[in-house]
Image (cartoon, helix red, strand yellow):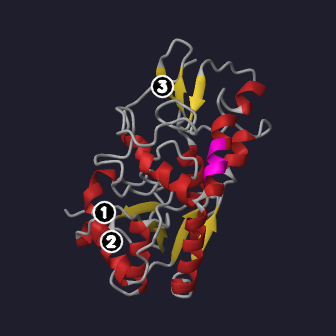
């Protein structure tokens, strides 16, 4: 006997990171090349580059009437991380122990500030906000912008009310193909989406931030200095954190880091040189998952 086919999705959503691949999917859908999305959901960490917010406004003007762009948020990750009264925020900081041991702090920021608010939005749009149970057979189809050169990042959803699909894999497009298409649409300047102070930035990205976004660079430098001895919340809870913490993989302050050296062995971001067009920080395929596991000095 053949298994029963899945019912049609109750909702077709795009996980919109506002980077190259997800922007391509949004435009292809609006043009009717791929099935139409009912909604595009952008999870805002509160610390995206100014260019990303400007790009979102532009997309809203271009396709917002056909495909509404819904912005959701779990808070401001930079403010929350530095607030001693806020719950503990765990970003993948590079750590240097008192005896020179190298490690990384745990990463929970993607799940808390991107995945959780998207799931909450999907449940609400389906008509079953938490804590209501989503009935079996009711689900949203969620399109994710992963291209064939990154096929290894494609993953199934971990909940029954979401079914992940990867239209770029189906049509065989690479990131280069997406860039070429966006150029034809007048969007060659589509930025990559990632927090201003993401520790998984390549050196080329840090240089770009320093040279083109002085305000963003100043925020990253100030944040890097503020977390040198761990998060304020850890101290307020009596959690002893030994060693020092950094945004840059060299485990040096951003202002002192050499931003022209090749990637080290515990960098993420896949293969390729520093100046290669890096993938955006997708809620469902954080580049941090590609780096070797490392412990945190304690």
Comparing 183 with 23, the one in front is 183
Is 116 magenta? The answer is no
Q: Residue at x 66, y 49 (%)?
A: 219
How much space separates mark 2 and mark 1, taking CA atoms? 8 Å
Residue underneath mark 3: 103
For residue 178, which numbered disc appears in the image?
A: 2
Marks 2 and 1: CB-CB under 8 Å?
yes
For residue 147, which numbered disc appears in the image?
A: 1
Part of the protein shown in magenta: 217-221
List x then y, in percent, for residue 208: 49, 55
Comparing 156 with 216, the one in front is 216
Instruction: Tell me if mark 3 has few (under 14), some (14-19) or many (20+) residues whose alpha carbon lies within 10 angstroms of its own.
Output: many
For residue 91, which numbered disc appears in the image?
A: none
**Is any part of residue 225 visible from this angle?**
yes
Of the image marks 2 and 1, the number of the one nearer the N terminus: 1
Instruction: Tell me if mark 1 has few (under 14), some (14-19) or many (20+) residues whose alpha carbon lies within 10 angstroms of its own.
Output: many
Q: Residue at x 44, y 76 (%)?
A: 26
Q: Residue at x 57, y 84 (%)?
A: 61
List x then y, in percent, for residue 250: 47, 32
């Amino acid at each position: 006997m053949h298994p029963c086919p899945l019912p049609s999705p109750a909702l077709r959503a795009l996980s919109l990171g506002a980077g190259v691949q997800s922007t391509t999917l949004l435009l292809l859908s609006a043009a009717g090349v791929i099935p139409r999305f009912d909604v595009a959901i952008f999870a805002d960490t509160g610390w995206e580059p100014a260019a990303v917010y400007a790009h979102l406004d532009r997309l809203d003007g271009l396709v917002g009437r056909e495909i509404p762009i819904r912005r959701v948020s779990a808070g401001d990750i930079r403010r929350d991380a530095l607030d001693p009264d806020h719950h503990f925020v765990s970003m993948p900081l590079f750590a240097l122990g008192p005896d020179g041991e190298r490690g990384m702090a745990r990463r929970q920021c993607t799940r808390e500030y991107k995945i959780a608010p998207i799931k909450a939005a999907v449940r609400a749009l389906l008509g079953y906000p938490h804590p209501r149970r989503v009935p079996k057979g009711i689900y949203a189809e969620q399109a994710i912008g992963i291209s064939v050169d990154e096929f290894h990042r494609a993953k199934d959803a971990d909940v029954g009310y979401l079914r992940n699909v990867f239209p770029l894999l189906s049509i065989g497009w690479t990131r280069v193909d997406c860039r070429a298409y966006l150029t034809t649409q007048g969007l060659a300047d589509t930025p990559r989406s990632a927090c201003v102070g993401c520790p998984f930035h390549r050196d080329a990205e840090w240089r770009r931030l320093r040279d083109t976004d002085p305000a963003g660079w100043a925020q990253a430098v100030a944040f890097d200095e503020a977390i040198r001895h761990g998060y304020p919340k850890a101290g307020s809870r009596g959690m002893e954190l030994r060693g020092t913490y950094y945004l840059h993989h060299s485990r040096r302050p951003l202002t002192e880091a050499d931003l022209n050296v090749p990637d080290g062995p515990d960098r993420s971001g896949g293969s390729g040189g520093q100046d290669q067009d890096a993938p955006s920080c997708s809620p469902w395929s954080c580049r941090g998952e590609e780096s070797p596991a490392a412990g945190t000095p304690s």
